[in-house]
Image (cartoon, grey):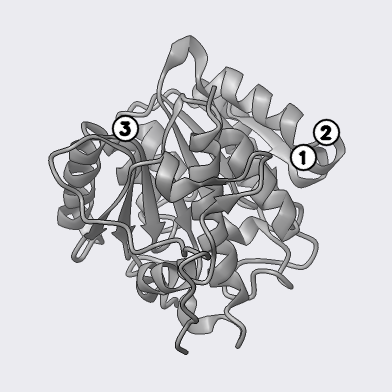
């Protein structure tokens, strides 16, 4: 569909390609999908997210209102070709490491949740915050195992905080694994009871201890299925869209968050109105908004 053109109503997206200059934020498509536990077309999502961004304005109302495109230097580094498998993960690490040298925030457009593993390593993160209904501590190599793989490769589990872990979406064995590792878990019910500001502040204190770099994993299947039907594992009763957006902006407002991924959206299985992809695109803008208001 052709979008209207109005010089007084700028659009988000269409950011310039990365160059040798310094950037506040860099976007990187990571279309992983081959090891997903559920059949997925998540490899189509980075392109769909870029199209969806064009539907939005880059304006924060303030006051005063500001244009993110004017107050932030934002670049698009394109996509990683074939990010699955050992060679693909090595490519992700290399690309993210290079971007981190030139951008204060690297945003990975997934793809499935497997990208969290290589992204966090490439960003040299020492802390991890996940917004996810699931522990991602499964055995093997899949979109259900990135947290376990990070820990096995030396990531300190005491610096991992998982927000939104849901009843009926996990097993006793993996809940016990998280407890045994010393991971901080804030359940979906507790996120709602305590509110975004409180849980994010605690998460940043733990994951960002001593000023270390934090990776933020935004798994959109933490949301209610009515707002995220394009996430294979989303269930009724999850977070509402506004709750996810609030959590994302609150986390990104802290300068210790140096990288983030947006994952588990299957653009090919979305509702006719593309509501899941559009929510994921808003998460990109919330990350940028948080960056723009970082003290």
- The secondary structure type at the circle numbered 1 is helix
Residue 222 higher or lower than 289, as above or below:
below
State the residue in front, 3 or 201. Answer: 3
Q: Quadrant of the C terminus?
A: top right
C-alpha separation, residue under disc 2 versus residue under disc 3: 32 Å
- The secondary structure type at the circle numbered 2 is helix
Is residue 171 visible to us here? Answer: no
Q: Residues within 10 Å of mark 1 (few under 14, many from 20)?
A: many
C-alpha separation, residue under disc 1 versus residue under disc 2: 5 Å
Q: Residue furthest front?
A: 8
Query: Which image quadrant for residue 205?
Result: top right
Q: Earlier in the sequence, mark 2 or mark 3?
A: 3
Which residue matches tag 1?
Answer: 191
Q: Residues within 10 Å of mark 2 (few under 14, many from 20)?
A: few
Callouts 1 and 2 close, C-beta under 8 Å: yes
Image location (x, y in percent) of residue 272: 60, 88
Residue 46 higher or lower than 245, as above or below:
below
Is residue 46 visible to us here? Answer: yes
Image location (x, y in percent) of residue 274: 57, 79
Q: Residue at x 45, y 87 (%)?
A: 2
Callouts 1 and 3 close, C-beta under 8 Å: no
Along the horizontal axis of the image, is 163 left or right of 190?
Answer: left
Residue 272 higher or lower than 204, as above or below:
below
Q: Residues within 10 Å of mark 3 (few under 14, many from 20)?
A: few
Q: Residue at x 66, y 53 (%)?
A: 170
Label annotation for residue 194 = 2
Image location (x, y in percent) of residue 147: 45, 41
């Amino acid at each position: 569909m052709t979008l209207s053109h109005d010089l007084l109503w700028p659009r988000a997206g269409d950011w310039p390609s990365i160059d040798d200059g310094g950037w506040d934020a860099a976007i990187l498509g990571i279309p992983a999908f081959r090891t997903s536990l559920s059949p997925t077309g998540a490899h189509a999502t980075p392109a769909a997210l870029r199209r969806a961004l064009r539907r939005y304005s880059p304006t924060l109302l303030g006051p005063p209102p500001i244009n993110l495109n004017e107050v932030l230097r934002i670049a698009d580094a394109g996509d990683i070709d074939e990010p699955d498998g050992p060679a693909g993960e090595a490519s992700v690490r290399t690309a993210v490491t290079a971007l981190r040298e030139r951008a204060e925030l690297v945003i990975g457009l997934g793809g499935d949740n497997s990208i969290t593993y290589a992204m966090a390593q490439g960003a040299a993160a020492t802390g991890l915050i996940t917004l996810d209904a699931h522990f991602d501590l499964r055995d093997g190599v899949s979109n259900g195992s990135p947290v376990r793989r990070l820990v096995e490769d030396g990531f300190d589990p005491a610096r991992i905080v998982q927000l939104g872990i849901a009843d009926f979406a996990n097993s006793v064995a993996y809940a016990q694994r998280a407890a045994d590792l010393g991971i901080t878990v804030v359940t979906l019910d507790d996120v709602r009871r305590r509110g975004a500001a409180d849980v994010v502040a605690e998460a940043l204190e733990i994951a960002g201890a001593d000023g270390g770099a934090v990776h933020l994993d935004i798994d959109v299947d933490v949301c209610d299925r009515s707002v995220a039907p394009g996430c294979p594992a989303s269930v009724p009763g999850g977070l509402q869209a506004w709750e996810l957006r609030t959590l994302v902006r609150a986390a990104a407002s802290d300068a210790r968050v140096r990288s983030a991924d947006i994952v588990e959206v299957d653009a090919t299985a979305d509702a006719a109105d593309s509501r899941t992809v559009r929510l994921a695109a808003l998460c990109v803008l919330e990350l940028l908004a948080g960056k723009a208001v970082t003290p």
